[in-house]
Amino acid sequence: MRNFLTFLFISLSFFCLAQDGSLKIVVEPVFDQAPLQLENKAYVDAHGDSLYIDEFKFYLSKLRFHNHEMIWGEQQSYHLVDAGDKSTQTFVIKNIPAGAYYNFTLLIGVDSMANVSGANGGDLDPVKGMYWAWNTGYIMTKLQGRSKVCKTLHHAFEFHIGGYLPPNNAARAVELYTPGLKIEAGKESVLHLKANAAEWFKNPETVDLAKMNEVNMPCKDAMRVADNYADMLSVY
Amino acid sequence: MRWVVYFFLFVLGGMMLAASFGFCPDPDEDIHFVVPPGWPQPHYDFSKNQVTKAGFNLGKRLFFDPVLSRDSSTSCASCHTQFSGFTHVDHSLSHGINGLKGTRNSLTLFNLAWGSSFMWDGGVNNLEVQPLNPITNPVEMDNKLENIVTKLNRSALYRPLFYSAFGDSLVTGQRVLKALAQFMVMLESYNSKYDKYMRHEPGGEMSEAELKGLKLFRQHCSSCHAEPLFTNGSFENNGLTVDTELNDYGRMKISRDPADSLKFKVPSLRNIVNSYPYMHDGRFGTLKQVLEHYTNGIVNSPTLARQLKKRMKLSEEDKNNIIAFLQTLSDKDFLFDGRYRNFGY
């Protein structure tokens, strides 16, 4: 009997292991078509203003994969992507049940749970600098740089977007179609995403940097910027 | 055979030596959180940060260590000293690094596990992340959590302490904050004369003046300064004039709601005679002045608390009795509790 149970246990765990695969997600920061280059390359936004980008960071969270039978979600799913740090642009999600997934949903930003649960670890650790101290909450996304049109110190513009309380919850749900995505048992598949910084400045609202160049607390302006970048991710 | 005995003696000796280093300064003391009888359940989620002796001791060490400030000049204890209920006495506005002045009076630190928001304006929603404010504030510690983590990771002293607290010697921002929180939630004050009176314990015998004061307090003050915590945790405008230099509108800065203009967190009145000066900007030096304010100084404005709209009438004797009662809220067991004392520096 004992032997049989051991056998069952081992074979079951083997069975489970063998049914799972992993997925490497590669996020490439871009500005329109071109790979994003920080600090020394000039870009032109939708309003026609020339600008440089110095910092581009954002959280991706609540990663979920859908097919006709099920939805599989990553636990403790928080990933900080930093255009200035290549190592953050690739991460691996493990133990996904094998199968084809036609749909991938996630949040740009972090959920309210993370915002109220005190000191978190990993990518949510406040050492990452994506945190407001005086008015608790994560800076969900950051885009900052310079443009001659900004009448600010060093012509700087700074978008620090966050806020988890309605009506200014800045997390944005994203749905991406992934018709070719297959997870195979014991193997690592790859999914390539692009994060387009140019989307911050347009659709639905064209940003005029001369008028809006500093957002750094939860507010209406933060919601406008978040609405703009809600479509910055794409699969390629 | 004999070398085996020697070997054992050697190992045993080593272990004793290690133990004496690790736990040396602490007398026999127990570190566990208490919910005093009749009190509500605490708000703090202990399940995600179980208080241990090692975690408490690490938090205490961090609390007293100026390494948290940019130039190693200022510790949490610089502005939060035990004998005053862990606030900054004498200074109306707290002083930090290079003697720079902040814009608000330091708050007392005790019974924090019952708090649901922190700071005078309630901008902080969890005790664990409160320390990020002084750490990063340019006029307080002017540092970055990143720098602290880097420094502590290089410290031969701290790494073993993180190991005993978290089972891993790696210092992370999360662990620094969790350790500080373990120390702070253990700052509990529930043994004042008033508490003993309520529990019918020896030492709880109140004088006639104190009892009259308690009655008046319940009549005029406890709608906001509610027992047993002596705060109801809400934000109210208690009729102070706006300081035109600081222009601090309190809660409105966080909620951005004009209805919150001039509202500040109702502070606890435990250990109040020890934690002068009073109010968010420390404008009053004595409790007499505070009572003078509540009777004659209330400024009317659209957000003034309903309870204070009608003039509060108190005779001189009433005021003295209220002050006599407030004195019974001092908790010597807490103010002189050896567990909170700092031995390392």
Image: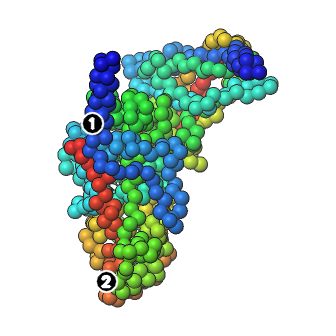
Residue B82's quadrant in the figure?
Answer: bottom left
Q: Residue furthest top?
A: A187
Going by the picture, which residue comes out furthest to the left? B98
State the scheme by which the image is colored: rainbow
Amino acid carrying label 2: it is Asn
Q: Nearer the viewer, residue B39 or A22?
A: B39
Question: What residue is rendered at 24% in x and 51% in y?
Answer: B78
Callout 2 secondary element? helix
Q: Which residue is mark 2?
A: B320
- The answer to whether residue A49 is left or right of residue B291 is right
* A19 over B263 or under it: above or below: above
**Image location (x, y in percent) of residue B336:** 28, 60
Give me the residue at 38% from left, 18% from top.
Answer: A40
Front residue of B327/A87: it is B327
Q: Position of residue A117 (x, y in %)?
A: 52, 43
Name the residue that disc number 1 marks.
B21
